[in-house]
Amino acid sequence: MTTVENAVSAQPVSVVSGPPLTEEPGLGTLTLPGFLREVTTAYADREALVMHESGDVTRWSYTDLWERAIEVARALRAVGIGKDSRVGVLMTNRPEWIAATFGTSLVGGVAVALSTFSTAAELDLLIGTSGISVLLFERTVANRDLAEALTDLEPKIGGSTPGDLQSVRYPHLRYLAAVGAAPAGGAVESWDTFVAGGRDVPREIVEATAAGVEPSDTAVLFFSSGTTSKPKGILSAHRGVSIQSWRFGRMYGFEPADDVRCWSANGFFWSGNFGMALGATLSKGGSLVLQSMFDAAEALALMQRERVNFPVAWPHQWAQLEAAPNWAGADLSAMRFVDNSTPIARHPSVSVDYREPGHAYGNTETFTISTAYPANTPDDVTAGSSGVPLPGVTVKVVEPLSGTPVPIGDSGEICVKGPTLMLGYLGVPLSETLDAEGFFHTGDGGHLDADGRLFWEGRLNDIIKTGGANVSPLEVDEALIGLPGVKVARTVGVPHDTLGEVVVACIVPHDGTNLEADTIRAHLREQLASYKVPRHVLFFGEDEITLTGSAKIKTDEVRTLATERLRNP
Protein backbone atom coordinates (compact mmCIF):
# COMPACT_ATOMS: atom_id res chain seq x y z
CA MET A 1 0.00 0.00 0.00
CA THR A 2 1.29 3.48 -0.87
CA THR A 3 1.04 6.40 1.49
CA VAL A 4 0.20 9.92 0.29
CA GLU A 5 1.42 12.63 2.65
CA ASN A 6 -0.65 15.73 3.41
CA ALA A 7 0.42 19.31 3.87
CA VAL A 8 -0.58 21.35 6.93
CA SER A 9 -3.45 22.76 4.88
CA ALA A 10 -4.76 19.20 4.48
CA GLN A 11 -4.40 19.56 0.71
CA PRO A 12 -2.61 16.42 -0.50
CA VAL A 13 0.85 17.13 -1.84
CA SER A 14 2.87 15.00 -4.19
CA VAL A 15 4.87 12.88 -1.76
CA VAL A 16 4.16 9.14 -1.89
CA SER A 17 5.87 6.23 -0.13
CA GLY A 18 5.79 2.51 -0.81
CA PRO A 19 5.60 -0.11 1.93
CA PRO A 20 8.69 -0.73 4.11
CA LEU A 21 11.46 -2.72 2.48
CA THR A 22 11.11 -5.28 5.27
CA GLU A 23 7.70 -6.18 3.86
CA GLU A 24 8.97 -6.99 0.38
CA PRO A 25 8.66 -10.72 -0.33
CA GLY A 26 11.29 -12.74 -2.11
CA LEU A 27 14.44 -10.88 -1.13
CA GLY A 28 17.52 -12.94 -0.40
CA THR A 29 21.07 -12.02 0.56
CA LEU A 30 21.81 -8.39 -0.30
CA THR A 31 25.35 -8.70 -1.65
CA LEU A 32 26.41 -9.98 -5.06
CA PRO A 33 28.56 -12.74 -3.53
CA GLY A 34 25.62 -13.71 -1.34
CA PHE A 35 23.19 -13.59 -4.25
CA LEU A 36 25.47 -15.81 -6.34
CA ARG A 37 26.10 -18.27 -3.53
CA GLU A 38 22.40 -18.51 -2.73
CA VAL A 39 21.22 -19.19 -6.29
CA THR A 40 24.10 -21.52 -7.19
CA THR A 41 23.43 -23.59 -4.07
CA ALA A 42 19.67 -23.72 -4.63
CA TYR A 43 19.87 -24.55 -8.34
CA ALA A 44 23.22 -26.36 -8.45
CA ASP A 45 22.64 -28.80 -11.30
CA ARG A 46 20.29 -26.65 -13.35
CA GLU A 47 21.50 -24.89 -16.46
CA ALA A 48 22.57 -21.31 -15.74
CA LEU A 49 23.60 -20.24 -19.24
CA VAL A 50 24.17 -21.41 -22.79
CA MET A 51 26.05 -19.81 -25.67
CA HIS A 52 26.42 -20.84 -29.29
CA GLU A 53 29.57 -19.45 -30.87
CA SER A 54 31.37 -20.43 -34.08
CA GLY A 55 29.85 -23.89 -34.06
CA ASP A 56 30.67 -24.56 -30.41
CA VAL A 57 28.16 -24.68 -27.58
CA THR A 58 28.99 -23.68 -24.00
CA ARG A 59 26.63 -24.72 -21.20
CA TRP A 60 27.22 -23.95 -17.55
CA SER A 61 25.28 -25.33 -14.65
CA TYR A 62 24.83 -23.14 -11.58
CA THR A 63 27.67 -25.06 -9.97
CA ASP A 64 29.82 -24.27 -13.01
CA LEU A 65 28.91 -20.60 -12.71
CA TRP A 66 30.07 -20.52 -9.08
CA GLU A 67 33.33 -22.29 -9.93
CA ARG A 68 34.08 -20.01 -12.90
CA ALA A 69 33.45 -16.93 -10.72
CA ILE A 70 35.78 -18.36 -8.06
CA GLU A 71 38.45 -18.89 -10.75
CA VAL A 72 38.21 -15.26 -11.83
CA ALA A 73 38.29 -14.09 -8.22
CA ARG A 74 41.48 -16.07 -7.52
CA ALA A 75 43.07 -14.70 -10.70
CA LEU A 76 42.12 -11.14 -9.75
CA ARG A 77 43.56 -11.65 -6.30
CA ALA A 78 46.81 -12.84 -7.93
CA VAL A 79 47.15 -9.58 -9.89
CA GLY A 80 46.55 -7.44 -6.82
CA ILE A 81 42.81 -6.78 -6.79
CA GLY A 82 41.27 -6.35 -3.35
CA LYS A 83 38.56 -4.41 -1.58
CA ASP A 84 37.28 -1.44 -3.62
CA SER A 85 39.73 -2.04 -6.49
CA ARG A 86 38.05 -1.37 -9.83
CA VAL A 87 37.96 -3.98 -12.60
CA GLY A 88 36.81 -2.98 -16.06
CA VAL A 89 34.68 -5.53 -17.93
CA LEU A 90 34.50 -4.74 -21.65
CA MET A 91 32.60 -7.64 -23.22
CA THR A 92 29.39 -8.57 -24.96
CA ASN A 93 26.90 -10.96 -23.32
CA ARG A 94 29.02 -14.05 -22.84
CA PRO A 95 29.87 -16.44 -20.00
CA GLU A 96 33.10 -14.60 -19.16
CA TRP A 97 31.19 -11.33 -18.59
CA ILE A 98 29.11 -12.98 -15.89
CA ALA A 99 32.09 -14.76 -14.32
CA ALA A 100 34.16 -11.56 -14.39
CA THR A 101 31.48 -9.38 -12.79
CA PHE A 102 30.62 -11.81 -10.01
CA GLY A 103 34.28 -12.80 -9.61
CA THR A 104 35.19 -9.18 -9.01
CA SER A 105 32.57 -8.99 -6.26
CA LEU A 106 33.95 -12.12 -4.57
CA VAL A 107 37.26 -10.37 -3.86
CA GLY A 108 35.52 -7.19 -2.70
CA GLY A 109 36.28 -5.30 -5.90
CA VAL A 110 34.07 -2.99 -7.96
CA ALA A 111 33.01 -4.25 -11.39
CA VAL A 112 33.06 -1.43 -13.96
CA ALA A 113 30.65 -2.22 -16.80
CA LEU A 114 31.96 -0.82 -20.09
CA SER A 115 29.90 -0.73 -23.27
CA THR A 116 31.33 -2.52 -26.30
CA PHE A 117 29.57 0.10 -28.45
CA SER A 118 31.93 2.78 -27.13
CA THR A 119 33.85 4.74 -29.74
CA ALA A 120 37.58 5.23 -29.24
CA ALA A 121 36.96 8.66 -27.71
CA GLU A 122 34.26 7.27 -25.40
CA LEU A 123 36.46 4.35 -24.38
CA ASP A 124 39.27 6.74 -23.59
CA LEU A 125 36.92 8.75 -21.36
CA LEU A 126 35.49 5.67 -19.60
CA ILE A 127 38.87 4.09 -18.84
CA GLY A 128 40.35 7.39 -17.76
CA THR A 129 37.54 8.45 -15.44
CA SER A 130 36.73 5.04 -13.96
CA GLY A 131 40.20 4.47 -12.46
CA ILE A 132 40.26 0.77 -13.27
CA SER A 133 43.31 -1.25 -12.24
CA VAL A 134 42.49 -4.29 -14.38
CA LEU A 135 40.74 -4.48 -17.74
CA LEU A 136 39.14 -7.77 -18.82
CA PHE A 137 37.96 -7.47 -22.41
CA GLU A 138 36.77 -9.37 -25.45
CA ARG A 139 39.42 -9.33 -28.17
CA THR A 140 37.11 -8.96 -31.17
CA VAL A 141 33.62 -7.43 -31.18
CA ALA A 142 31.73 -6.93 -34.45
CA ASN A 143 34.99 -7.27 -36.44
CA ARG A 144 36.61 -4.60 -34.28
CA ASP A 145 39.92 -5.51 -32.65
CA LEU A 146 39.65 -4.04 -29.17
CA ALA A 147 43.29 -4.85 -28.39
CA GLU A 148 44.28 -2.71 -31.35
CA ALA A 149 41.85 0.04 -30.32
CA LEU A 150 43.30 0.09 -26.80
CA THR A 151 46.87 0.16 -28.08
CA ASP A 152 46.00 3.07 -30.35
CA LEU A 153 44.80 4.95 -27.27
CA GLU A 154 47.83 3.97 -25.18
CA PRO A 155 50.81 2.67 -27.24
CA LYS A 156 52.52 1.48 -24.05
CA ILE A 157 50.00 -1.38 -23.94
CA GLY A 158 51.78 -2.82 -26.95
CA GLY A 159 55.24 -2.25 -25.53
CA SER A 160 54.88 -3.39 -21.92
CA THR A 161 54.90 -6.81 -20.32
CA PRO A 162 51.79 -8.27 -18.60
CA GLY A 163 51.16 -6.74 -15.20
CA ASP A 164 53.80 -4.06 -15.65
CA LEU A 165 51.97 -1.34 -17.55
CA GLN A 166 53.11 2.15 -16.52
CA SER A 167 50.76 4.59 -18.20
CA VAL A 168 50.51 8.31 -17.60
CA ARG A 169 47.28 8.34 -19.61
CA TYR A 170 45.71 5.59 -17.46
CA PRO A 171 47.79 5.75 -14.28
CA HIS A 172 45.73 3.16 -12.35
CA LEU A 173 45.65 0.54 -15.11
CA ARG A 174 48.23 -2.19 -14.60
CA TYR A 175 46.91 -5.43 -16.06
CA LEU A 176 44.86 -6.49 -19.13
CA ALA A 177 43.50 -9.86 -20.23
CA ALA A 178 41.53 -10.75 -23.34
CA VAL A 179 38.92 -13.36 -24.19
CA GLY A 180 40.09 -14.73 -27.50
CA ALA A 181 43.61 -14.80 -28.91
CA ALA A 182 45.93 -12.41 -27.09
CA PRO A 183 48.06 -10.17 -29.30
CA ALA A 184 51.67 -11.23 -29.70
CA GLY A 185 53.83 -9.40 -27.17
CA GLY A 186 52.70 -6.45 -25.11
CA ALA A 187 50.76 -6.12 -21.87
CA VAL A 188 47.68 -8.18 -22.78
CA GLU A 189 47.48 -11.79 -21.60
CA SER A 190 45.06 -14.44 -22.79
CA TRP A 191 42.05 -15.37 -20.68
CA ASP A 192 43.45 -18.85 -20.03
CA THR A 193 46.76 -17.42 -18.83
CA PHE A 194 44.91 -14.94 -16.62
CA VAL A 195 42.82 -17.69 -14.99
CA ALA A 196 45.83 -20.00 -14.59
CA GLY A 197 47.62 -17.24 -12.69
CA GLY A 198 45.21 -17.60 -9.79
CA ARG A 199 45.61 -21.30 -9.16
CA ASP A 200 48.04 -20.75 -6.30
CA VAL A 201 45.65 -18.39 -4.49
CA PRO A 202 43.94 -20.37 -1.70
CA ARG A 203 40.24 -20.81 -2.32
CA GLU A 204 39.63 -20.10 1.36
CA ILE A 205 40.98 -16.56 0.92
CA VAL A 206 38.43 -15.78 -1.78
CA GLU A 207 35.62 -17.31 0.24
CA ALA A 208 36.66 -15.16 3.20
CA THR A 209 36.75 -11.94 1.15
CA ALA A 210 33.33 -12.80 -0.30
CA ALA A 211 31.89 -13.37 3.18
CA GLY A 212 33.28 -10.01 4.27
CA VAL A 213 31.41 -7.98 1.64
CA GLU A 214 28.73 -5.75 3.19
CA PRO A 215 25.46 -4.60 1.56
CA SER A 216 26.63 -0.99 1.86
CA ASP A 217 29.91 -1.64 0.00
CA THR A 218 30.32 -0.44 -3.57
CA ALA A 219 29.44 -3.24 -5.99
CA VAL A 220 29.40 -1.81 -9.50
CA LEU A 221 30.10 1.25 -11.58
CA PHE A 222 27.74 1.70 -14.53
CA PHE A 223 27.67 4.61 -16.93
CA SER A 224 24.59 6.49 -18.04
CA SER A 225 23.77 6.30 -21.72
CA GLY A 226 24.36 10.00 -22.25
CA THR A 227 21.51 11.19 -24.49
CA THR A 228 22.32 14.82 -23.80
CA SER A 229 25.83 14.86 -22.35
CA LYS A 230 28.89 12.76 -21.69
CA PRO A 231 28.23 9.53 -19.79
CA LYS A 232 28.15 9.85 -16.01
CA GLY A 233 29.76 7.21 -13.82
CA ILE A 234 27.22 5.92 -11.30
CA LEU A 235 28.33 3.93 -8.25
CA SER A 236 25.84 1.46 -6.78
CA ALA A 237 25.99 -0.52 -3.56
CA HIS A 238 25.57 -4.27 -3.27
CA ARG A 239 22.25 -3.75 -1.55
CA GLY A 240 20.75 -1.84 -4.47
CA VAL A 241 21.95 -4.23 -7.18
CA SER A 242 20.88 -7.28 -5.18
CA ILE A 243 17.44 -5.90 -4.31
CA GLN A 244 16.69 -5.25 -7.96
CA SER A 245 17.98 -8.67 -9.02
CA TRP A 246 15.70 -10.44 -6.55
CA ARG A 247 12.87 -7.98 -7.19
CA PHE A 248 12.67 -8.39 -10.95
CA GLY A 249 12.06 -12.11 -10.61
CA ARG A 250 9.08 -11.35 -8.39
CA MET A 251 7.81 -8.53 -10.61
CA TYR A 252 7.82 -10.78 -13.67
CA GLY A 253 5.95 -13.44 -11.70
CA PHE A 254 8.62 -16.11 -12.19
CA GLU A 255 8.82 -19.30 -10.16
CA PRO A 256 11.61 -21.92 -10.22
CA ALA A 257 9.19 -24.39 -11.82
CA ASP A 258 8.77 -22.08 -14.82
CA ASP A 259 12.19 -23.02 -16.22
CA VAL A 260 12.76 -19.46 -17.39
CA ARG A 261 14.91 -19.27 -20.52
CA CYS A 262 15.89 -15.68 -21.20
CA TRP A 263 17.30 -14.20 -24.38
CA SER A 264 18.22 -10.52 -24.44
CA ALA A 265 19.07 -8.29 -27.38
CA ASN A 266 21.02 -5.89 -25.22
CA GLY A 267 24.20 -5.84 -23.16
CA PHE A 268 24.42 -6.60 -19.47
CA PHE A 269 26.59 -3.47 -19.22
CA TRP A 270 23.32 -1.50 -18.97
CA SER A 271 21.70 -1.58 -15.56
CA GLY A 272 18.20 -2.25 -16.89
CA ASN A 273 19.31 -5.35 -18.73
CA PHE A 274 21.33 -6.54 -15.72
CA GLY A 275 18.25 -6.41 -13.51
CA MET A 276 15.52 -7.38 -15.97
CA ALA A 277 17.34 -10.20 -17.77
CA LEU A 278 20.30 -11.46 -15.74
CA GLY A 279 19.00 -10.78 -12.23
CA ALA A 280 15.42 -11.90 -12.80
CA THR A 281 16.50 -15.10 -14.54
CA LEU A 282 19.17 -16.22 -12.09
CA SER A 283 17.04 -15.35 -9.06
CA LYS A 284 14.55 -18.06 -10.07
CA GLY A 285 16.95 -20.69 -11.37
CA GLY A 286 16.48 -19.95 -15.07
CA SER A 287 18.96 -20.06 -17.93
CA LEU A 288 20.49 -17.16 -19.87
CA VAL A 289 20.52 -17.86 -23.61
CA LEU A 290 23.40 -15.64 -24.68
CA GLN A 291 23.82 -13.89 -28.01
CA SER A 292 26.98 -11.84 -28.34
CA MET A 293 25.67 -9.28 -30.84
CA PHE A 294 22.06 -8.76 -31.87
CA ASP A 295 21.22 -10.18 -35.26
CA ALA A 296 17.49 -10.64 -35.82
CA ALA A 297 17.60 -13.76 -38.00
CA GLU A 298 20.19 -15.44 -35.78
CA ALA A 299 18.19 -14.48 -32.69
CA LEU A 300 15.04 -16.16 -34.02
CA ALA A 301 16.96 -19.34 -34.81
CA LEU A 302 18.51 -19.26 -31.34
CA MET A 303 15.13 -18.74 -29.66
CA GLN A 304 13.74 -21.72 -31.54
CA ARG A 305 16.73 -23.99 -30.83
CA GLU A 306 16.93 -23.15 -27.12
CA ARG A 307 13.18 -22.90 -26.49
CA VAL A 308 13.37 -19.34 -25.18
CA ASN A 309 10.29 -18.32 -23.20
CA PHE A 310 11.38 -14.89 -21.91
CA PRO A 311 12.74 -12.49 -24.57
CA VAL A 312 13.99 -9.01 -23.64
CA ALA A 313 14.33 -6.36 -26.35
CA TRP A 314 13.64 -2.72 -27.20
CA PRO A 315 10.86 -1.65 -29.64
CA HIS A 316 13.21 -1.12 -32.59
CA GLN A 317 14.61 -4.62 -32.06
CA TRP A 318 11.13 -6.16 -31.97
CA ALA A 319 10.60 -4.47 -35.32
CA GLN A 320 13.79 -5.99 -36.72
CA LEU A 321 12.78 -9.45 -35.53
CA GLU A 322 9.41 -9.09 -37.23
CA ALA A 323 11.14 -8.02 -40.46
CA ALA A 324 13.67 -10.89 -40.45
CA PRO A 325 13.43 -13.37 -43.37
CA ASN A 326 12.86 -16.35 -41.06
CA TRP A 327 10.20 -14.64 -38.94
CA ALA A 328 7.12 -16.36 -40.34
CA GLY A 329 8.61 -19.86 -40.23
CA ALA A 330 10.23 -19.70 -36.79
CA ASP A 331 8.87 -22.00 -34.07
CA LEU A 332 8.44 -19.71 -31.07
CA SER A 333 5.83 -21.84 -29.36
CA ALA A 334 7.85 -22.00 -26.12
CA MET A 335 7.18 -18.31 -25.46
CA ARG A 336 5.40 -17.57 -22.18
CA PHE A 337 6.69 -14.36 -20.63
CA VAL A 338 6.18 -12.04 -23.55
CA ASP A 339 4.03 -8.94 -23.39
CA ASN A 340 0.81 -8.93 -25.40
CA SER A 341 1.84 -5.69 -27.12
CA THR A 342 5.00 -7.11 -28.72
CA PRO A 343 5.18 -8.62 -32.22
CA ILE A 344 6.29 -11.97 -30.80
CA ALA A 345 3.01 -12.26 -28.90
CA ARG A 346 1.24 -11.99 -32.27
CA HIS A 347 3.48 -14.57 -33.97
CA PRO A 348 1.42 -17.45 -35.46
CA SER A 349 3.22 -20.03 -33.33
CA VAL A 350 2.74 -18.13 -30.06
CA SER A 351 -0.29 -18.29 -27.80
CA VAL A 352 0.12 -16.18 -24.66
CA ASP A 353 -1.85 -13.81 -22.49
CA TYR A 354 0.78 -12.01 -20.44
CA ARG A 355 1.51 -8.43 -19.48
CA GLU A 356 5.04 -7.69 -18.39
CA PRO A 357 5.72 -5.26 -15.52
CA GLY A 358 6.20 -2.53 -18.11
CA HIS A 359 4.26 0.12 -16.20
CA ALA A 360 7.41 1.23 -14.42
CA TYR A 361 9.74 4.16 -13.90
CA GLY A 362 13.42 4.11 -13.02
CA ASN A 363 16.91 5.41 -13.67
CA THR A 364 20.46 4.12 -13.71
CA GLU A 365 20.84 6.19 -10.53
CA THR A 366 18.38 3.87 -8.77
CA PHE A 367 19.71 0.79 -10.57
CA THR A 368 16.46 0.68 -12.54
CA ILE A 369 12.93 0.69 -11.19
CA SER A 370 11.57 2.89 -8.41
CA THR A 371 7.89 2.59 -9.28
CA ALA A 372 6.13 -0.31 -11.00
CA TYR A 373 3.23 -2.73 -11.09
CA PRO A 374 3.86 -6.49 -11.22
CA ALA A 375 3.16 -8.56 -14.30
CA ASN A 376 -0.46 -9.05 -15.34
CA THR A 377 -1.78 -6.03 -13.44
CA PRO A 378 -5.12 -5.06 -15.06
CA ASP A 379 -5.32 -1.95 -17.22
CA ASP A 380 -7.89 -0.33 -14.95
CA VAL A 381 -5.33 -0.48 -12.14
CA THR A 382 -2.29 0.72 -14.08
CA ALA A 383 -4.40 3.38 -15.83
CA GLY A 384 -1.56 4.30 -18.17
CA SER A 385 0.73 5.11 -15.25
CA SER A 386 4.33 4.21 -14.45
CA GLY A 387 3.27 2.34 -11.33
CA VAL A 388 3.39 3.00 -7.61
CA PRO A 389 6.46 3.32 -5.36
CA LEU A 390 8.16 0.00 -4.63
CA PRO A 391 9.02 -1.10 -1.09
CA GLY A 392 11.33 1.34 0.66
CA VAL A 393 10.91 4.00 -2.06
CA THR A 394 9.53 7.51 -1.64
CA VAL A 395 8.64 9.67 -4.64
CA LYS A 396 7.90 13.36 -4.61
CA VAL A 397 7.04 15.74 -7.41
CA VAL A 398 8.28 19.29 -6.94
CA GLU A 399 8.23 22.65 -8.61
CA PRO A 400 11.58 22.54 -10.44
CA LEU A 401 12.92 25.93 -9.38
CA SER A 402 11.81 26.09 -5.74
CA GLY A 403 11.91 22.36 -4.93
CA THR A 404 8.54 22.64 -3.18
CA PRO A 405 6.19 19.65 -3.54
CA VAL A 406 3.28 20.43 -5.84
CA PRO A 407 -0.35 19.43 -5.15
CA ILE A 408 -1.43 15.95 -6.14
CA GLY A 409 -2.23 15.93 -9.86
CA ASP A 410 0.03 18.85 -10.74
CA SER A 411 3.09 18.29 -12.91
CA GLY A 412 6.64 18.95 -11.78
CA GLU A 413 10.03 17.30 -11.42
CA ILE A 414 10.14 13.68 -10.24
CA CYS A 415 12.40 13.09 -7.20
CA VAL A 416 13.15 9.72 -5.62
CA LYS A 417 14.93 8.15 -2.67
CA GLY A 418 15.11 4.59 -1.48
CA PRO A 419 17.28 1.54 -0.82
CA THR A 420 18.58 1.21 -4.39
CA LEU A 421 19.61 4.85 -4.81
CA MET A 422 23.18 5.26 -6.01
CA LEU A 423 26.11 5.95 -3.74
CA GLY A 424 26.91 8.89 -6.00
CA TYR A 425 28.41 10.04 -9.28
CA LEU A 426 32.11 9.70 -9.93
CA GLY A 427 33.86 12.88 -8.94
CA VAL A 428 30.76 14.64 -7.60
CA PRO A 429 30.11 15.12 -3.85
CA LEU A 430 26.85 13.52 -2.78
CA SER A 431 25.79 16.84 -1.27
CA GLU A 432 25.70 18.27 -4.79
CA THR A 433 23.57 15.40 -6.07
CA LEU A 434 20.84 14.97 -3.45
CA ASP A 435 18.65 17.58 -1.79
CA ALA A 436 18.55 18.19 1.96
CA GLU A 437 16.02 15.37 2.44
CA GLY A 438 18.13 12.86 0.51
CA PHE A 439 16.06 12.90 -2.68
CA PHE A 440 17.59 12.56 -6.14
CA HIS A 441 16.14 15.11 -8.56
CA THR A 442 15.79 13.13 -11.78
CA GLY A 443 15.28 15.87 -14.36
CA ASP A 444 12.13 14.03 -15.47
CA GLY A 445 8.69 15.57 -15.52
CA GLY A 446 5.55 13.88 -14.22
CA HIS A 447 2.74 13.89 -11.70
CA LEU A 448 1.23 11.72 -8.97
CA ASP A 449 -2.46 10.98 -8.63
CA ALA A 450 -4.57 10.42 -5.52
CA ASP A 451 -3.95 6.66 -5.70
CA GLY A 452 -0.20 7.14 -5.50
CA ARG A 453 0.42 6.33 -9.16
CA LEU A 454 3.26 8.06 -10.96
CA PHE A 455 2.73 9.37 -14.49
CA TRP A 456 5.98 10.05 -16.33
CA GLU A 457 5.76 12.88 -18.87
CA GLY A 458 9.28 12.88 -20.29
CA ARG A 459 12.43 14.83 -19.65
CA LEU A 460 11.70 18.29 -18.32
CA ASN A 461 13.54 19.87 -21.23
CA ASP A 462 11.57 17.66 -23.66
CA ILE A 463 8.12 18.88 -22.59
CA ILE A 464 6.62 20.82 -25.49
CA LYS A 465 5.09 24.20 -24.63
CA THR A 466 2.70 25.19 -27.38
CA GLY A 467 0.21 28.05 -27.19
CA GLY A 468 0.36 28.07 -23.39
CA ALA A 469 -0.28 24.33 -23.04
CA ASN A 470 2.16 21.55 -22.11
CA VAL A 471 2.37 18.48 -24.33
CA SER A 472 4.09 15.28 -23.25
CA PRO A 473 5.96 13.88 -26.28
CA LEU A 474 5.70 10.43 -24.69
CA GLU A 475 1.91 10.51 -24.96
CA VAL A 476 2.07 11.35 -28.67
CA ASP A 477 4.80 8.75 -29.28
CA GLU A 478 2.72 6.02 -27.67
CA ALA A 479 -0.19 6.85 -29.97
CA LEU A 480 2.11 6.82 -33.00
CA ILE A 481 3.99 3.60 -32.29
CA GLY A 482 0.75 1.61 -32.34
CA LEU A 483 0.08 2.57 -35.98
CA PRO A 484 0.84 -0.06 -38.65
CA GLY A 485 3.98 0.81 -40.56
CA VAL A 486 5.55 2.98 -37.84
CA LYS A 487 8.93 1.58 -36.82
CA VAL A 488 10.35 4.44 -34.71
CA ALA A 489 8.58 7.60 -33.52
CA ARG A 490 9.83 10.64 -31.64
CA THR A 491 7.78 13.78 -31.08
CA VAL A 492 9.61 17.05 -30.53
CA GLY A 493 8.87 20.74 -30.15
CA VAL A 494 10.16 23.08 -32.84
CA PRO A 495 10.34 26.86 -32.21
CA HIS A 496 7.42 28.92 -33.52
CA ASP A 497 7.04 32.71 -33.60
CA THR A 498 3.59 32.92 -31.99
CA LEU A 499 2.97 29.56 -30.31
CA GLY A 500 6.39 29.23 -28.69
CA GLU A 501 6.72 25.70 -30.08
CA VAL A 502 4.76 23.50 -32.45
CA VAL A 503 4.38 19.75 -32.06
CA VAL A 504 6.26 17.78 -34.72
CA ALA A 505 6.17 14.00 -35.13
CA CYS A 506 9.30 12.41 -36.60
CA ILE A 507 8.74 8.89 -37.91
CA VAL A 508 10.90 6.12 -39.35
CA PRO A 509 8.55 3.87 -41.38
CA HIS A 510 8.96 0.14 -41.83
CA ASP A 511 10.51 -0.79 -45.15
CA GLY A 512 7.95 -1.12 -47.93
CA THR A 513 5.23 0.89 -46.19
CA ASN A 514 3.59 4.03 -47.54
CA LEU A 515 2.59 6.31 -44.70
CA GLU A 516 0.70 9.57 -45.25
CA ALA A 517 1.01 12.53 -42.90
CA ASP A 518 -2.68 13.48 -43.21
CA THR A 519 -3.80 9.93 -42.40
CA ILE A 520 -1.59 9.85 -39.31
CA ARG A 521 -2.87 13.22 -38.11
CA ALA A 522 -6.47 12.09 -38.63
CA HIS A 523 -5.81 8.99 -36.53
CA LEU A 524 -4.24 11.03 -33.74
CA ARG A 525 -7.21 13.42 -33.65
CA GLU A 526 -9.31 10.46 -32.50
CA GLN A 527 -6.99 9.79 -29.57
CA LEU A 528 -5.50 13.11 -28.48
CA ALA A 529 -6.67 16.59 -27.62
CA SER A 530 -6.40 18.90 -30.60
CA TYR A 531 -3.43 20.86 -29.21
CA LYS A 532 -1.45 17.62 -28.85
CA VAL A 533 -1.90 16.56 -32.47
CA PRO A 534 1.35 17.25 -34.38
CA ARG A 535 1.25 20.27 -36.64
CA HIS A 536 3.75 18.49 -38.88
CA VAL A 537 4.53 14.82 -39.53
CA LEU A 538 8.00 14.21 -40.97
CA PHE A 539 9.47 10.97 -42.29
CA PHE A 540 13.12 9.96 -41.96
CA GLY A 541 15.33 7.04 -42.87
CA GLU A 542 16.55 4.78 -40.09
CA ASP A 543 20.11 5.99 -40.67
CA GLU A 544 19.05 9.57 -39.92
CA ILE A 545 17.70 8.92 -36.40
CA THR A 546 20.55 8.30 -33.96
CA LEU A 547 20.04 5.96 -31.01
CA THR A 548 22.27 5.67 -27.99
CA GLY A 549 23.56 2.20 -27.17
CA SER A 550 20.63 1.59 -24.83
CA ALA A 551 18.15 2.45 -27.59
CA LYS A 552 17.34 5.94 -26.36
CA ILE A 553 16.74 8.47 -29.09
CA LYS A 554 18.90 11.58 -29.01
CA THR A 555 16.07 14.10 -28.86
CA ASP A 556 18.23 17.16 -29.48
CA GLU A 557 19.47 15.68 -32.75
CA VAL A 558 15.93 14.81 -33.85
CA ARG A 559 14.78 18.34 -33.00
CA THR A 560 17.60 19.75 -35.11
CA LEU A 561 16.70 17.45 -38.02
CA ALA A 562 13.05 18.49 -37.80
CA THR A 563 13.89 22.18 -37.64
CA GLU A 564 16.13 21.94 -40.70
CA ARG A 565 13.55 19.88 -42.64
CA LEU A 566 10.83 22.45 -41.96
CA ARG A 567 13.15 25.30 -42.86
CA ASN A 568 14.24 23.61 -46.09
CA PRO A 569 11.41 21.27 -47.14
Image (tube, grey):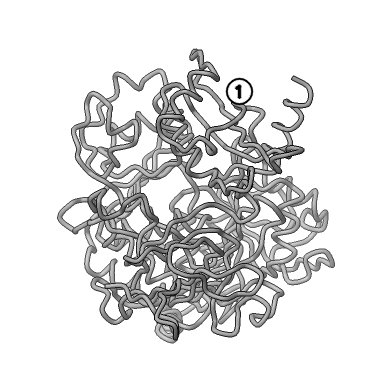
Image-quadrant location for residue 419: bottom left
Residue underneath mark 1: 539
Q: Alpha-carbon neighbours of circle 1 within 10 Å: few (<14), some, or many (≥20)?
A: some
**Relative horizontal placement of residue 404, taking residue 163 as reference (left or right):** left
Would residue 34 be visible to someone looking at this image? no
Q: Position of residue 298 (x, y in %)?
A: 42, 29
Amino acid type of the residue that numbered disc 1 sits on in the rendered structure: Phe
Point 26% across, 79% down: residue: 23
Q: Position of residue 480 (x, y in %)?
A: 47, 32
Is 330 rendered above or below residue 179? above
Is 29 rendered above or below residue 343? below
Q: Position of residue 244 (x, y in %)?
A: 38, 66
Of 13 and 373, which appears nearest the observer?
A: 13
Is 79 rendered above or below residue 542? below
Image-quadrant location for residue 559: top right
Image-quadrant location for residue 296: top left
Element at label 1: strand
**Relative horizontal placement of residue 381, taking residue 88 as reference (left or right):** left
Would residue 90 be visible to someone looking at this image? yes
* Quadrant of the drawing holding the C terminus: top right
Of 171 and 401, which appears nearest the observer?
A: 401
Point 64% across, 80% down: residue: 430
